[in-house]
Image (spheres, grey):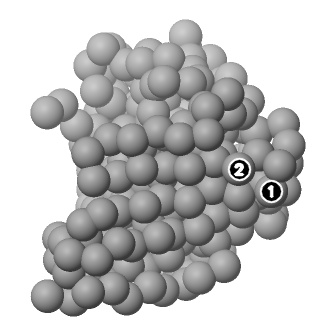
Protein backbone atom coordinates (compact mmCIF):
# COMPACT_ATOMS: atom_id res chain seq x y z
CA UNK A 1 0.00 0.00 0.00
CA UNK A 2 1.42 3.43 -0.89
CA UNK A 3 2.56 5.46 2.07
CA UNK A 4 3.72 8.91 3.05
CA UNK A 5 7.43 8.93 3.85
CA UNK A 6 9.21 11.47 6.02
CA UNK A 7 12.88 12.19 6.52
CA UNK A 8 14.73 12.42 8.77
CA UNK A 9 13.07 10.40 11.50
CA UNK A 10 14.88 12.44 14.14
CA UNK A 11 16.46 15.87 13.84
CA UNK A 12 18.40 17.59 16.58
CA UNK A 13 19.20 21.26 16.13
CA UNK A 14 20.34 24.21 18.16
CA UNK A 15 18.04 27.10 18.94
CA UNK A 16 18.13 29.70 16.20
CA UNK A 17 19.13 27.28 13.47
CA UNK A 18 17.08 26.58 10.37
CA UNK A 19 15.63 23.12 9.78
CA UNK A 20 13.93 21.56 6.80
CA UNK A 21 11.67 18.58 7.28
CA UNK A 22 10.98 16.53 4.20
CA UNK A 23 8.02 14.52 3.08
CA UNK A 24 7.11 12.48 0.04
CA UNK A 25 3.30 12.31 -0.16
CA UNK A 26 1.40 9.51 -1.86
CA UNK A 27 1.84 10.00 -5.58
CA UNK A 28 -1.75 10.58 -6.72
CA UNK A 29 -2.67 12.78 -3.77
CA UNK A 30 -3.28 16.46 -4.36
CA UNK A 31 -3.64 17.90 -0.87
CA UNK A 32 -0.79 18.10 1.58
CA UNK A 33 -0.63 18.93 5.26
CA UNK A 34 1.69 19.39 8.19
CA UNK A 35 0.60 18.61 11.73
CA UNK A 36 2.61 18.50 14.90
CA UNK A 37 2.34 16.92 18.33
CA UNK A 38 4.20 18.39 21.25
CA UNK A 39 4.96 15.73 23.84
CA UNK A 40 1.89 15.06 25.95
CA UNK A 41 -0.36 17.29 23.88
CA UNK A 42 -2.81 16.90 21.04
CA UNK A 43 -1.97 16.49 17.39
CA UNK A 44 -2.51 19.97 15.98
CA UNK A 45 -2.93 21.35 12.49
CA UNK A 46 -0.24 23.59 11.06
CA UNK A 47 -0.90 24.11 7.37
CA UNK A 48 -2.63 22.73 4.30
CA UNK A 49 -1.32 23.08 0.76
CA UNK A 50 -2.95 22.62 -2.62
CA UNK A 51 -2.08 23.61 -6.15
CA UNK A 52 1.25 25.06 -5.05
CA UNK A 53 -0.15 27.40 -2.49
CA UNK A 54 -1.21 27.43 1.12
CA UNK A 55 -4.93 26.72 1.53
CA UNK A 56 -5.14 27.32 5.24
CA UNK A 57 -2.77 27.83 8.14
CA UNK A 58 -3.12 27.87 11.89
CA UNK A 59 -2.02 30.54 14.33
CA UNK A 60 1.03 28.42 15.08
CA UNK A 61 2.20 28.75 11.48
CA UNK A 62 3.81 32.15 11.80
CA UNK A 63 6.47 33.84 9.67
CA UNK A 64 9.10 31.42 10.94
CA UNK A 65 7.42 28.59 9.07
CA UNK A 66 7.19 28.01 5.36
CA UNK A 67 6.20 25.15 3.09
CA UNK A 68 7.26 24.30 -0.40
CA UNK A 69 6.74 21.69 -3.04
CA UNK A 70 10.01 22.11 -4.89
CA UNK A 71 9.38 19.32 -7.38
CA UNK A 72 6.70 16.82 -8.28
CA UNK A 73 7.28 14.58 -5.29
CA UNK A 74 8.66 16.39 -2.25
CA UNK A 75 6.81 18.56 0.24
CA UNK A 76 8.92 20.41 2.78
CA UNK A 77 8.40 22.31 6.01
CA UNK A 78 11.04 24.89 6.88
CA UNK A 79 11.48 26.51 10.26
CA UNK A 80 13.79 29.49 9.81
CA UNK A 81 14.96 30.11 13.36
CA UNK A 82 14.02 27.30 15.69
CA UNK A 83 12.90 27.87 19.25
CA UNK A 84 12.87 25.46 22.15
CA UNK A 85 9.07 25.27 21.94
CA UNK A 86 9.30 23.99 18.35
CA UNK A 87 10.42 20.64 19.75
CA UNK A 88 7.72 18.19 18.69
CA UNK A 89 6.80 15.35 16.37
CA UNK A 90 6.00 16.76 12.96
CA UNK A 91 3.66 14.72 10.80
CA UNK A 92 3.17 15.17 7.09
CA UNK A 93 -0.10 13.98 5.57
CA UNK A 94 -1.71 13.84 2.16
CA UNK A 95 -5.14 13.17 0.73
CA UNK A 96 -6.78 12.74 -2.66
CA UNK A 97 -9.43 15.35 -2.00
CA UNK A 98 -9.75 18.20 0.46
CA UNK A 99 -12.60 16.79 2.49
CA UNK A 100 -15.05 14.00 3.07
CA UNK A 101 -14.47 10.46 1.99
CA UNK A 102 -10.83 11.29 1.57
CA UNK A 103 -9.09 10.62 4.85
CA UNK A 104 -5.62 11.96 5.50
CA UNK A 105 -2.76 9.50 5.28
CA UNK A 106 0.04 10.34 7.70
CA UNK A 107 3.74 9.67 7.59
CA UNK A 108 5.63 8.29 10.58
CA UNK A 109 6.78 11.73 11.60
CA UNK A 110 10.01 13.58 12.26
CA UNK A 111 10.95 14.10 15.86
CA UNK A 112 12.47 17.57 16.11
CA UNK A 113 14.53 18.33 19.19
CA UNK A 114 15.68 21.91 19.67
CA UNK A 115 18.42 22.37 22.26
CA UNK B 1 -8.61 24.11 22.05
CA UNK B 2 -11.22 21.83 23.59
CA UNK B 3 -13.48 21.37 20.59
CA UNK B 4 -12.84 17.63 20.53
CA UNK B 5 -12.43 15.76 23.78
CA UNK B 6 -11.63 12.21 24.70
CA UNK B 7 -12.18 12.09 28.41
CA UNK B 8 -10.73 8.63 29.03
CA UNK B 9 -6.95 8.65 28.73
CA UNK B 10 -6.82 4.86 28.90
CA UNK B 11 -8.92 1.74 28.56
CA UNK B 12 -8.09 -1.88 29.29
CA UNK B 13 -10.18 -4.79 27.97
CA UNK B 14 -9.85 -8.53 27.71
CA UNK B 15 -9.17 -10.13 24.34
CA UNK B 16 -12.43 -11.10 22.63
CA UNK B 17 -14.51 -8.51 24.48
CA UNK B 18 -15.84 -5.24 23.15
CA UNK B 19 -13.80 -2.03 23.36
CA UNK B 20 -15.76 1.22 23.41
CA UNK B 21 -13.89 4.46 22.94
CA UNK B 22 -15.74 7.72 23.38
CA UNK B 23 -15.37 11.20 22.00
CA UNK B 24 -17.30 14.44 22.54
CA UNK B 25 -17.27 17.59 20.48
CA UNK B 26 -18.61 21.08 20.95
CA UNK B 27 -18.86 22.57 17.47
CA UNK B 28 -22.14 21.68 15.78
CA UNK B 29 -20.67 22.76 12.43
CA UNK B 30 -18.43 19.69 12.30
CA UNK B 31 -19.84 17.39 9.63
CA UNK B 32 -17.29 14.63 9.25
CA UNK B 33 -15.57 12.59 11.92
CA UNK B 34 -12.71 10.15 11.81
CA UNK B 35 -10.94 7.68 14.04
CA UNK B 36 -7.21 7.13 13.80
CA UNK B 37 -5.03 4.54 15.48
CA UNK B 38 -1.44 5.24 16.41
CA UNK B 39 1.34 2.86 17.38
CA UNK B 40 4.53 4.17 19.03
CA UNK B 41 7.03 5.65 16.56
CA UNK B 42 4.44 5.64 13.78
CA UNK B 43 2.06 8.20 12.37
CA UNK B 44 -1.71 8.05 12.87
CA UNK B 45 -3.38 5.43 10.68
CA UNK B 46 -6.90 6.02 9.43
CA UNK B 47 -9.44 3.53 10.76
CA UNK B 48 -12.97 4.60 10.00
CA UNK B 49 -15.01 7.73 9.38
CA UNK B 50 -18.59 8.90 9.52
CA UNK B 51 -20.47 11.74 7.92
CA UNK B 52 -22.91 13.74 10.01
CA UNK B 53 -25.77 12.57 7.78
CA UNK B 54 -25.33 9.08 9.20
CA UNK B 55 -25.52 7.70 12.72
CA UNK B 56 -23.55 4.52 12.16
CA UNK B 57 -20.77 3.24 9.95
CA UNK B 58 -19.35 -0.24 10.11
CA UNK B 59 -16.16 -1.72 8.72
CA UNK B 60 -15.37 -5.24 9.85
CA UNK B 61 -14.70 -5.27 13.57
CA UNK B 62 -14.94 -1.49 13.80
CA UNK B 63 -18.17 0.47 14.12
CA UNK B 64 -18.50 4.18 14.69
CA UNK B 65 -21.69 5.64 16.15
CA UNK B 66 -22.62 9.29 15.95
CA UNK B 67 -25.16 11.00 18.21
CA UNK B 68 -25.45 14.53 16.87
CA UNK B 69 -27.90 15.74 19.49
CA UNK B 70 -25.44 14.76 22.22
CA UNK B 71 -22.41 15.78 20.13
CA UNK B 72 -20.92 12.41 20.91
CA UNK B 73 -19.32 9.66 18.89
CA UNK B 74 -17.97 6.30 19.86
CA UNK B 75 -15.83 3.62 18.32
CA UNK B 76 -16.70 0.00 19.02
CA UNK B 77 -14.17 -2.73 18.39
CA UNK B 78 -15.51 -6.24 18.60
CA UNK B 79 -13.96 -8.64 19.19
CA UNK B 80 -10.92 -6.85 20.55
CA UNK B 81 -7.52 -8.33 19.73
CA UNK B 82 -4.11 -7.78 21.35
CA UNK B 83 -2.95 -6.13 18.11
CA UNK B 84 -5.55 -3.44 18.65
CA UNK B 85 -3.50 -2.11 21.55
CA UNK B 86 -2.61 1.44 20.51
CA UNK B 87 -3.59 5.07 21.02
CA UNK B 88 -6.89 5.95 19.38
CA UNK B 89 -7.64 9.49 18.28
CA UNK B 90 -10.96 10.85 17.22
CA UNK B 91 -10.89 13.84 14.90
CA UNK B 92 -13.43 16.23 13.48
CA UNK B 93 -13.15 17.81 10.09
CA UNK B 94 -13.31 21.56 10.33
CA UNK B 95 -13.34 23.03 6.83
CA UNK B 96 -10.63 20.68 5.65
CA UNK B 97 -8.41 20.61 8.70
CA UNK B 98 -8.65 17.98 11.40
CA UNK B 99 -9.23 18.83 15.04
CA UNK B 100 -7.96 15.95 17.16
CA UNK B 101 -8.88 14.71 20.59
CA UNK B 102 -6.22 13.93 23.16
CA UNK B 103 -6.29 10.23 22.45
CA UNK B 104 -7.21 7.13 24.43
CA UNK B 105 -4.67 4.40 25.02
CA UNK B 106 -6.30 1.01 24.54
CA UNK B 107 -4.72 -2.07 26.01
CA UNK B 108 -6.16 -5.43 25.01
CA UNK B 109 -5.02 -8.17 27.34
CA UNK B 110 -4.63 -11.73 26.04
* Helix, strand or loop at mark 2: strand
* Left or right position of A15 against B69: left
Q: Quadrant of the N terminus of chain B?
A: bottom right
Please report the residue visible at 49 percent of the width from the left and 50 percent of the height from the top. B64
Judge the density around disc 1: few (<14), some (14-19), many (≥20) Cα neighbours within 10 Å: few
- Measuring 76% from the left and 46% from the top, which residue is drawn there? B68
Q: On screen, A16 above or below A35?
A: below
The residue drawn where x is 80% and y is 56% is B70
Taking the spot 35% from the left edge, 62% from the top edge, the residue there is B77
Identify the image quadrant of residue A30: top left
In the visual, does B30 lie left or right of B77?
Answer: right
Mark 2: few, some, or many residues within 10 Å (few <14, many ≥20)? some
- Against B63, residue B49 (above or below) is above
Quarter of the rendering occupied by the C terminus of chain B: bottom left
Say if mark 1 contacts mark 2, CB within 8 Å: yes
Residue B18 appears at what percent x and percent y? 35, 72
x and y, in percent, of residue A91 in the image: 44, 52
Residue A50 numbered mark, or none:
none
Q: Position of residue B55 (x, y in %)?
A: 61, 40
| Side of A76 relative to A40 (left or right) | left
State whether discs 1 and 2 lie on one chain: yes
Residue topped by disc 2: B67
Q: Which residue is mark 1?
A: B70
| Distance Cα–Cα, label 1 vs label 2 | 6 Å
Query: A83 or B72, which lies in front?
Result: B72
Is residue B2 something that shows in the picture?
Answer: yes
Chain of the residue displaying label 1:
B
Amino acid sequence: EPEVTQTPSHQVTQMGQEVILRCVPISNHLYFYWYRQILGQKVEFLVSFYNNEISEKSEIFDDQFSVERPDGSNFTLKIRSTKLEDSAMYFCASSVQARHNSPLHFGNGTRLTVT
Amino acid sequence: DQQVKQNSPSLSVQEGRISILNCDYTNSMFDYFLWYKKYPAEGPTFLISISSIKDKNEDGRFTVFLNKSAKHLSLHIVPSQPGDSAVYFCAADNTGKLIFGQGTTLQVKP
